[in-house]
Image (cartoon, coloured by chain):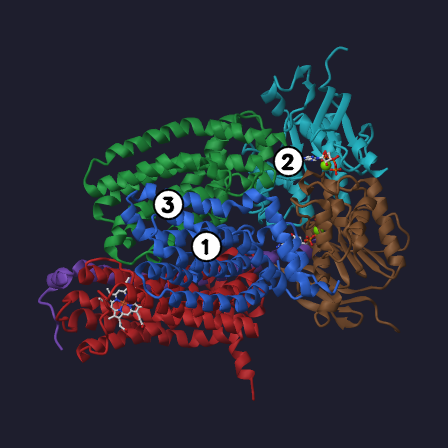
Chain colours: A red, B purple, C blue, D green, E cyan, F brown
Amino acid sequence: MNWTWFYRLGSPLWFYQMTTRWLPWLSLLAFVLLTTGLVWGLGFAPQDAKQGNSFRIIYLHVPASFLALAGYFLMATAGAIGLIWKMKLSYMIMKSAAPIGAALTFLALFTGAVWGKPTWGSYWVWDARITSMLILLFLYFGVLALQYAFHNEESGNKASAVLALVGTVNIPIIYKSVDWWYTLHQPSTIKLTSAPSMHPDMFHPLLVMILGFYCFYVVALCLFTRVEILRRERKTAWVGELAARSSNAVEGAKQ
Amino acid sequence: MKFQFQDVGQMLNMGGHGFYVWSAVIVTLMIIIGLIIRPLIQHRVVLSQIGQDLAREKLRKRVDGENN
Amino acid sequence: MRSHASNGFCAYLRRDLRLSHRRLGEAASPLIFFIMVSTLVPLGITPDPASLALVASGIIWVFALLATMLSANDLFTGDYQDGSLEQLLISPQVLVMPVLGKVTAHWLVTGLPLTIVSPLLGLMLSLPEAGYFPMMASLALGTACLSLLGAVGAALTVSLQKGGMLLALVVMPLYMPVIIFGGATVQYGIDGLAWTGPLAILGAMLAAAIALCPLAIAGVLRLTSIN
Amino acid sequence: MRSHASNGFCAYLRRDLRLSHRRLGEAASPLIFFIMVSTLVPLGITPDPASLALVASGIIWVFALLATMLSANDLFTGDYQDGSLEQLLISPQVLVMPVLGKVTAHWLVTGLPLTIVSPLLGLMLSLPEAGYFPMMASLALGTACLSLLGAVGAALTVSLQKGGMLLALVVMPLYMPVIIFGGATVQYGIDGLAWTGPLAILGAMLAAAIALCPLAIAGVLRLTSIN
Amino acid sequence: MGNPSLITIENLRFERDDTTVVNCDHLHLDAGDILQVEGPNGSGKTTLLRLLTTALQPCEGTILYCGKSIIECRLEYLSDILFIGHQSAVKLSLTAEENLAWMAMSQLDSSSVLNALESLGLAGYTDIPCYKLSAGQKRRVALARLLISDARIWYLDEPFTAIDREGVKLLERCMKDHVSSGGAVVVSTHQDLDLKGVRHYPILGESLLRACS
Amino acid sequence: MGNPSLITIENLRFERDDTTVVNCDHLHLDAGDILQVEGPNGSGKTTLLRLLTTALQPCEGTILYCGKSIIECRLEYLSDILFIGHQSAVKLSLTAEENLAWMAMSQLDSSSVLNALESLGLAGYTDIPCYKLSAGQKRRVALARLLISDARIWYLDEPFTAIDREGVKLLERCMKDHVSSGGAVVVSTHQDLDLKGVRHYPILGESLLRACS
Ligand code: HEM
Ligand SMILES: Nc1ncnc2c1ncn2[C@@H]1O[C@H](COP(=O)(O)OP(=O)(O)OP(=O)(O)O)[C@@H](O)[C@H]1O
Ligand SMILES: Nc1ncnc2c1ncn2[C@@H]1O[C@H](COP(=O)(O)OP(=O)(O)OP(=O)(O)O)[C@@H](O)[C@H]1O
Ligand SMILES: [Mg+2]
Ligand SMILES: [Mg+2]
């Protein structure tokens, strides 16, 4: 088995060069998808029979929720790869995924809460999905806090990777236990509406938004990771050249 | 497929749910833009910092060379 | 110096117990905290027994959790600050046994006393009678879980020189399942349902925690103490 | 070196704020603690909004008190351990001003943020709408009181080296009036009564605390020198 | 007698757990003196210095500052002394510069703070948090106070701990400068001072000796 | 070459925040050696010793114990060394006797623990809690481990801190006895050792020197 591709994946330089090439195209795609989805969803999708126009929040809420969760698993996986194969790049990806994930989790909570007021009459209820989302936010905060609390970068990486991994086990447990506890104690008063029964006219813009969010997520992750790469590889020759070139460019622009 | 609202006012109002929908939209856009802008700024800052460090080091080496 | 690899557990258990004995004021503080804080609740909420009875089980569990968490914070800091932890890390033994010894000592001076005094609090907060036995059983198992999980958090934050309540941030999410099933056990008892169900789940969690946490703690201590 | 007697307040205020800024994780922890613990309650008790609304104001006040008290506990330990406290005691100035500076810094990094985020918790615990403003007003005054009283406890703990929360809990009885009137303010607001009454009492308590506590703290700290 | 001595100790006695730890019949310190307190471990050097700084109160006897009891002229006395003990009062999360500026109670401009640190060999280390410094470097941060203080009497408890040889020479020079400009120094150390005119005050360390014999 | 040295260091390098703190091309330690690591404050002595005890992992290079890498024969190596650093691992609320018995992992009967403490001059202080001891007495409690340990290699980081002259002589005698029975000692200190046959390993301390010049 040839493993060179695996180690090339772990090379920050390779990652930096690849993203330099592909990022513009990906950003364009993300922009197009998000704009289309947003205009379609907010202006053209039909109104929901029961919820009226407040239903349009779905086009923001569902993609954000998806990515908040997916982002967490990506972060934990990156942490695990870092711990096992001691790959520097994957720690950088883990560190970059944390702020993005926290922001998206906050977004999911915010859009959910804002949606809850018109539909349930209150901003917040202690439902399994909502509770576990809140805890996910706490876990993201924990990873971020650990990462920055350590004076030693390596210790910070390892500690936050461990926490991310432990959290991966924890999230489904919390989801299950809240669900179990809640449904047994309070017969379900409120349930999130279920997607599959959705009308295609409503569903297609949602699909576009989800795709758009995925693209956006990848773009943001790459941008954060590139900064991290520069910061940690600043002693290498290639970053030095890059810095020299960019400062020359700035001087050139001034003259 | 047709545009669901008669005019901009109605679209802003969203049948009484305008506040909820538009605040969600605005926060979403702010977060998306923030997540793109921040690393772009950081990228520039970090590069220029590294550039400055390198320049300073070069200067120091040159001064050391002259002294010796 | 080889033979102590086997009795690292006992050695640390004994030493930590002796240390708590010497500093009784400190060792007793989780317990006192538990009792005094629970007396605040009627003042802040309502002195009406009927309303208190509704929230009693939850309150007791929340404060037991807090007392355990706050004291877990110091599990390794003393050893870190005076260099004992470094000596442990460079001692020729597997780390798991001493760690388990320390956690056991912690449970013996926090979780166990909490469990024992909990009926008193039940009385003060007008806990229905059917809740007493489930409460004690769930506290005994649950606080052991909490000690183990808290030790993981303490290990993660030890080299941060008193990470303060950063520990809370790290550990609280891990505590959630414990408190859900702990609270549920008591509530089932009160409602006359089969409270052994959630108690069994707590037991399973404890078994898993005993198997995994010491390994995690040992690993984390090695990872984070490299500065 | 004489002139700093007058600006001891500012000097200590500025230094302690800078220290908290450096150790942001630690400084933010009372806030995080406050938020996270409040989420434990629905899990431990009940997720039903109607029942939560009944206990919300009390819960928020109890946890605000805990967060303040626990963080006040460390107010002097850092300075004691590294010798800064001894230097302060042998510095040619009245102790009251530096002490007041430290307490103010403590309130700015705990009480104030707690007050600011409290509406969020009110939302999550389904606090009735009429309670929001009384809650914030009473928390702002009340946490300042608690910081001052907590500092007395911290000074006792540090000077008698009896560690732990034991001595801090000695001041717990002093906390009781604060929580009683704080909780009452919110409850009056919810019930549509004149909540300015209990709030005024809180204000009076704060005035008394500002006048007396720094003196008490300074006196107690001088006791450290007898060892 | 003319002028009274800067510091005069009369019949000072301090007890701990019913054993006498410090017992000093008579001792005086004049301007220009360097007094080295010597004695085996546990003989009471630290205790004596802490008595002199008013951090401890004696059981018996008095300490006079320019003829007045230090309890009476407390604030005046305290603003004339500087004490550096085993614990160095350095905050690990602040930088060396911030620590020193704080200790000087922000009465100095930052350049004199930086100068003090640099002349103690900490150039290049002034703007990193102190937990990143080595043991000796941390100690140097604390000792930099000597260079910026205008106190007349210095009480130094084992100032040379963790300091290298160059550093010791530097400190000795500081002390010489200080006493030649009318100050006085009381220093407890186990090493010999490479200075002229040092007065020695040997403490017998009864308790330890008795225990050993 | 015959037998390999007890400890061999090859091309050891350790970085902190992108600056090289320890850079040791070649160093070896044989049975019977006393190696004194010398250098100015902040030159990396403590870091070198912590690398040798495996408390830190080097960025490059290897440390061999009897020809095998210390990572491979970790447990064997660790049970043959003893490290006493700046922090002394003495629990202040336990008595000297309890502290030492604990450090010996209760393999010794209490009389040999008491003997060790007494021969370090702590007779009469063995049964009071350590927070009541003076700085030097606390340090002596930590150093009493030397007398009860059966480790072959001692790593001592500034062992003489706060110790009086008698104590220093005592410790020097301990070290001599240890090496003459086939052990080895690596000691970092700023003082001169009054022993014959001490090898010196001077560290240049680039970073500090550069910053000062
Ligand atoms: C703060 C409140 C809320 C939070 C934290 C939240 C969280 C989530 C999460 C995490 C998901 C993704 C679930 C998955 O991938 O399986 C989701 C999906 C969804 N949410 Fe919410 N939600 C909230 C409020 C609401 C409200 C008020 C509604 C509508 C009444 C709603 C409707 C939906 C729908 C329709 C989906 C997609 C359904 C599916 O794919 O299973 N949510 N929400
Ligand atoms: N935790 C740390 N993080 C970053 N840098 C550190 C840390 N500890 C020490 N250093 C730096 O590493 C260098 C070597 O430190 P070390 O403690 O090994 O010095 P040392 O030779 O023992 O000095 P001393 O004689 O003062 O004890 C110093 O320049 C110091 O600033
Ligand atoms: N907090 C305390 N409580 C009780 N006794 C104490 C305390 N601190 C010190 N002692 C005792 O007082 C005596 C003098 O202690 P001191 O610290 O003054 O000695 P020292 O001369 O400074 O010694 P060293 O050279 O070790 O620093 C010692 O015998 C010690 O045991
Ligand atoms: Mg002393
Ligand atoms: Mg050192």
Image side of residue F67 versus residue A179, left or right? right
Estimate the x, y position of residue F174 in percent, counting from the top left.
Answer: 85, 51
Q: Nearer the viewer, mark 1 or mark 2?
A: 1
Q: Bin the neighbour count of mark 3 within 10 Å (Cα to Cα): few under 14, some 14-19, many 20 and up.
A: some
Amino acid at circle 1:
Ala
Vertical order, D153 against F192 (above or below): above
Q: Bin the neighbour count of mark 1 within 10 Å (Cα to Cα): few under 14, some 14-19, many 20 and up.
A: many
Compare residues C224 and A241 and report the one nearer the observer. Answer: C224
The CA span between labels 1 and 2 is: 38 Å
Give the quarter the ligand 1 occupies.
bottom left
Amino acid at circle 3:
Met
Compare residues C133 and C99 and report the one nearer the observer. Answer: C133
Vertical order, C51 against E75 (above or below): below
Q: Nearer the viewer, mark 3 or mark 1?
A: 3
Residue labelled 1 has its Cβ within 8 Å of some atom of ligand 1: no
- The structure residue drawn at horizontal position 83% and vertical position 38%, both measured from the top left corner, is E212
The disc numbered 2 marks a residue on which chain? E
- Quadrant in which the N terminus of chain D appears: top right
Q: Which residue is mark 1?
A: C168
Q: Which SS class for mark 2?
A: helix
Vertical order, A178 against D210 (above or below): below
- Residue C124 tag number: 3
Q: Which SS class for mark 1?
A: helix
The disc numbered 3 marks a residue on which chain? C
Residue A254 visible in rendering: no
Q: Which residue is mark 2?
A: E145
Amino acid at circle 2:
Arg
